[in-house]
Image (cartoon, rainbow, N blue to C red):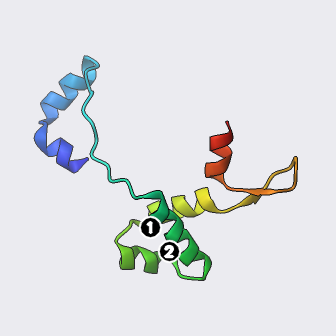
């Protein structure tokens, strides 16, 4: 966000917000799903999120999000295990 805000003055941002034209895109970095799963698998072996974060350069919050999404939970209907990503795909 700082990169975007460096390009736009506060006055411009206020004006853009007030007239509803705030349509600039925030720069995001997306990691490949395979990488997310690999980090999750390493975390399952007992590696701390903090260590994974420093080792792979991924923010701790991002890793916690991946763990939350990939950690299986039991469904009440069938008793099977599923993760949040699979559950969202079913909707």
Q: In the picture shown, does residue 65 fall above or below 43?
A: above
Specify the label residue 60 is tagged with. 1
How far apart marks 2 and 1 lie (CA) works out to 6 Å
User: Who's the residue at 82% across and 56% down the image?
Assistant: 80
Q: Is residue 15 left or right of residue 83?
A: left
Specify the label residue 13 is tagged with. none
Q: Is residue 35 left or right of residue 83?
A: left
Q: Position of residue 19 (x, y in %)?
A: 25, 16
Around disc 2, counting alpha carbons within 10 Å, would you say few (fewer than 14), some (14 to 19), or many (20 or more)? Answer: many
Q: Is residue 89 left or right of residue 75?
A: left
Q: Is residue 11 left or right of residue 67?
A: left
Q: In the picture shown, does residue 20 fall above or below 60?
A: above
Of callouts 2 and 1, the N-terminal one: 2
Pointers 2 and 1 in contact (C-beta within 8 Å): yes
Q: Position of residue 70 (x, y in %)?
A: 61, 60
Quadrant of the image occupied by residue 25: top left
Specify the label residue 49 is tagged with. 2
User: Who's the residue at 39% across and 65% down the image?
Assistant: 59
Foreground pick, 68 / 6: 68
């Amino acid at each position: 966000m700082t990169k975007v805000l460096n390009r736009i003055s506060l006055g411009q941002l206020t004006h853009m917000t007030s007239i509803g034209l705030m349509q600039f895109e925030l720069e995001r970095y997306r990691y490949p799903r395979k990488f997310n799963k690999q980090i999750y698998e390493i975390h399952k072996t007992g590696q701390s999120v903090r260590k994974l974060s420093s080792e792979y350069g991924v923010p701790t919050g991002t890793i916690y999000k991946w763990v939350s999404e990939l950690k299986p939970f039991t469904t009440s209907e069938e008793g099977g295990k599923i993760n949040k990503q699979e559950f969202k795909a079913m909707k």
